Amino acid sequence: MPTNKPTGAQLVISTLKALGVDVLFGYPGGAIMPIYDALAGSGLRHILVRHEQGASFAADSYARATGRVGVCMATSGPGATNLITGIANAYMDSVPVVFITGQVATHLMGTDGFQEVDFLGLTLPVVKHSWLVRDAAQIPAILARAFAIAKEGRPGPVLVDIPKDVAASFVEASEMGELPAWTPPAPKAESIDAARALIEQAQKPLLYIGGGVHMADADAEMRDFVERTGIPFVSTLKGLGTVSTYHDLHLGMLGMHGTRAGNMAVQATDLLIAVGARFDDRATGKLSAFAPHAKVIHFDIDPAEFHKNRRADVAILGDLKQALPALQPKMPDISEWVKFNKTNKWQHRFKYDAPGKGVYAPGLLKSLSEKAGKKFIVACDVGQHQMWVAQHCEFEQNLAHLTSGGSGAMGYGLPAGMGAKLGLPDHHVVTVSGDGSFMMNIQEMATLRRYGINLKIVLLDNSSLGLVRQWQELFYEENYSEIDLSDNPDFVEVAKAFGLSAFRITQRHEVEGAIDRLLAADAPTLLHVLIDPRENVWPLVPPGASNAEMMEERWDEPIDSY
Amino acid sequence: MSQSIHIEIDRLEGTLLRVLGLIERRGFHIDQIDMYDLGADTRGLSVTVRPRDAGRNIDILGLQIDRLYGIKRLEHAPERAQNAEPSAEKLSA
């Protein structure tokens, strides 16, 4: 019945617009149809993906790249369950995304209705907060709160599940209401003083920079702190680029696939200063042997992270934008320590003169990074290529490196590149993927084509699940179990069938020209690179070992052409 | 060794499951639960928990529960670990 009252669905759309949303990612279906009905003609830009997981990853990367809240919509049941990997990904990496899902009508809930699943229940462990909306009049206030929660403190995903009848119901127009402003807590002066005292007493201080710095928008403060103190630093996978990786005090990534210089520094330091980092097992290796001689200062916005994996001597809760400038130590002489680390960095630098004529993936990525320039963003998938990107690409800023860190979700790369390019259209955005990962969301090439999203794709194809194959080689006595992907399709032909430009290289001498051609293309383009399936990621800390026990590369055989 | 946690939670859908699920996922057995009314919008919850292994820290568990939305108060919360600062005052969801 026509009425001048808005529906719940119309309130969803008007609230999203009022909250400043300019693009959202989704896929319609039965239970969310009222919201899609209200979306049509609303002026909101909706990106129709080809699988809900693609929408979830694209919204995640859009949020990482722009610093804004990502928005993603899907219908009930299988539409919603297809989001779960993306929700978990955002949760593990603390990314602010609001997920809006349709739900079956309230009278059908609990009856095993068509496309019914208890999505609030399914997602409880992987959301920061969630709502099942039962009163349409509450939609503006709930959505506004969802956006606030997604961003405040330690960011994360928030779910708003809306039954179909609630979305379709007419209600009195309601407002978002005044949201109580959240202000990050200021660090305590006594904690800052305690930290300063430890730094002034240290002989071998080391910064351990995590992804939380960028999430706190404290990159500039972090850079200033490094310049003021001259303390060498290592980065986590998510922390790369927070302070430029070109910086001469940067010792690389720490941990399982970290640099030798970085891990040596961690093992030798007498004061580890963790900033927005959570002592993840991939970073620490054997926890009891991690930074064995170090006292610990730990900065975090989430008090539940303090002492979780490693006891901190000083825990500083609060806003990094305030905490880092407040910490003004009078630096002791650490010149010998700095020299020790710079020497290690030089002696253990990566080498790119691998024997053979085949494409050497680390060398290709190094060239890509150099040629793409400072407005270069790389979105990774998960596997060997992800670690090679972290090791061999340089990042001027943190947002230049989009990677599924905590979750390690294969399939992230293509939709993540898409979301980043939509958020930052004037940047060179390159998805670097592997053949296993790429197949997991290959359908999103259709989305690139539809919207003309000028994403470049470098597909490193070793015809196998490379990182699993590497572990089976090293730790399972070469018992290769279910990692063979040698019957992959012809990716160039597949990309062309989706309407993309595509070409292939197999030889090392083709690399430079191929990268130039890829970056110069004015349309979405795929570069298919065949690499040696035997190529491994080095260094490697074996599982359960200390970061001091790094396995190193040996070039016993040439890198072959394929 | 069992320990009790007393929590005040709101009545919003999912809050109880959120708390109980978190306790189990973070490596604690739930030995006993008592729930009681504390007015129209609030329920009281007393949970007796026991760590599954020596690596589980009830202080950390308390902080992890405390950061959930819908938790109004952790009464007799486990003592915060030495040097950890108190969590920021939260907005009720």
Image (cartoon, coloured by chain):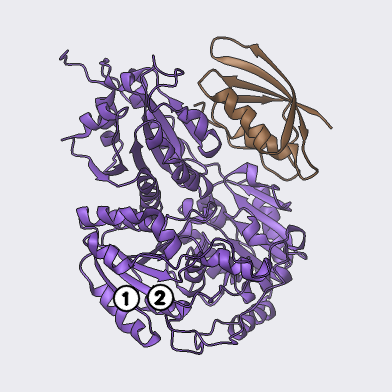
Disc 2 target residue: A530
Q: Quadrant of residue A206?
A: bottom right
For the N terminus of chain A, which image quadrant?
top left
In the rendered structure, the answer to whether residue A413 lies left or right of residue A310 reads: left
Please name the residue that numbered disc 1 is placed on.
A504
Q: Position of residue A453 (x, y in %)?
A: 24, 58
Quarter of the C terminus of chain A within the rendering: bottom left
Chain painted in brown in the figure: B
Q: Is residue A106 above or below residue A400?
A: above
- Tally of marks: 2
Are dots 2 and 1 in contact, CB under 8 Å?
yes
Q: Quadrant of residue A436?
A: bottom left
Residue at 62% across, 11% down: B38
Q: Which subunit holds the residue at mark 2?
A: A
| Residue A314: numbered disc | none
Q: Residue, x 26% and y 77% (percent of image)?
A: A517
Q: Label 2 to label 1, Cα distance in Å?
A: 8 Å
- Label 1 marks which chain's residue? A
Residue B1: x, y in percent?
84, 32
Whether residue A525 is situated above or below residue A355 in the rendered picture: above
